[in-house]
Image (spheres, helix red, strand yellow):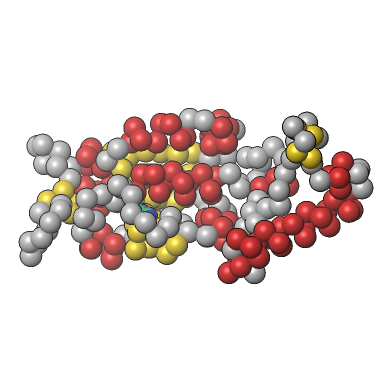
Amino acid sequence: MRIDILTIFPEMFQGPFSHSIIKRATEKKLAEIHLHDIRDYSTNKHKRIDDYPFGGGAGMVMMIEPIAKCIDALKSKRKYDEIIFLTPDGEKLTQNISNRLSTYKNIIMLCGHYKGVDERVREQYITMEISIGDYVISGGELAAAVLSDSIIRIIPGVIGDETSALSDSFQDGLLSPPVYTRPSSYKGLKVPDILLSGNDKKIDEWRHEQAIKRTKNRRPGLL
Ligand code: ADE
């Protein structure tokens, strides 16, 4: 899978993309991430990419031209399955959306800033708008990093233990059950006996019960 990210802060992705699972996925060539600095597509001599809103009001608006030029250049090279704008007024991200996007070949993500982007970009280029939650962050970069991570980690072959991504919270509509590791007793705090019993069937049943109980208590809306 190839992800092209349009941003005015490409350096912001260095941290999240150079560690752990995303790093492994790119090293294994299961995922390719290409960062594009929107400023490189500005024809303005000061490399401006934003301007005052028509009609007045606070904040700046990202201009259509540099974004359109960058997307047109990418689209002339390959076909994209989805062109996603990260925005707090988009559709709220769910595991189902990430599952679907992880089956695609080429995706563009556009990171917004300031007061937003010229509406004509959304009308002419964007095929999907995603929010990572009902709160506002300073720009689309962290949201694009979250979305990329949630997509890439479930590409087959990225996580060594294939079943591990499938047993994540939300994959079966349930939260994950509690987990424990050594020591089996810490300052009198004991691990549930069933997990030490060696009875796989009983352990599976216990985990399923715990997942239901946890979901009922914490996120009843998921049931
Ligand atoms: N940009 C600012 N806030 C955002 C959010 N919650 N989701 C996606 N993009 C954003």
Residue 110: percent from left, percent from top: 34, 50
Q: Is residue 58 left or right of residue 143?
A: left
Q: Is residue 195 left or right of residue 156?
A: right
Foreground residue among 79 and 48: 48
Residue 174: percent from left, percent from top: 66, 60
- The number of numbered discs placed on residues in the rendered structure image is 0
Quarter of image, ligand 1: bottom left
Q: Is residue 69 left or right of residue 158?
A: left
**Which residue extends farthest front?**
188
In the rendered view of the protein, which quadrant contains the C terminus? Answer: bottom right
Q: Is residue 47 left or right of residue 218?
A: left
Q: Is residue 22 above or below residue 71?
A: above
Q: Residue at x 37, y 56 (%)?
A: 135
Q: Is residue 96 visible?
A: yes
Foreground residue among 193 and 106: 193
Residue 58: percent from left, percent from top: 12, 56
Query: Residue 189, located in which quarter of the rendered image?
Result: top right
Foreground residue among 80 and 13: 13
Q: Residue at x 86, y 45 (%)?
A: 193
Residue 139: percent from left, percent from top: 31, 47
Q: Is residue 128 visible?
A: no
Q: Residue at x 78, y 31 (%)?
A: 183
Q: Residue at x 53, y 37 (%)?
A: 22
Query: Residue 103, located in which quarter of the rendered image?
Result: bottom right
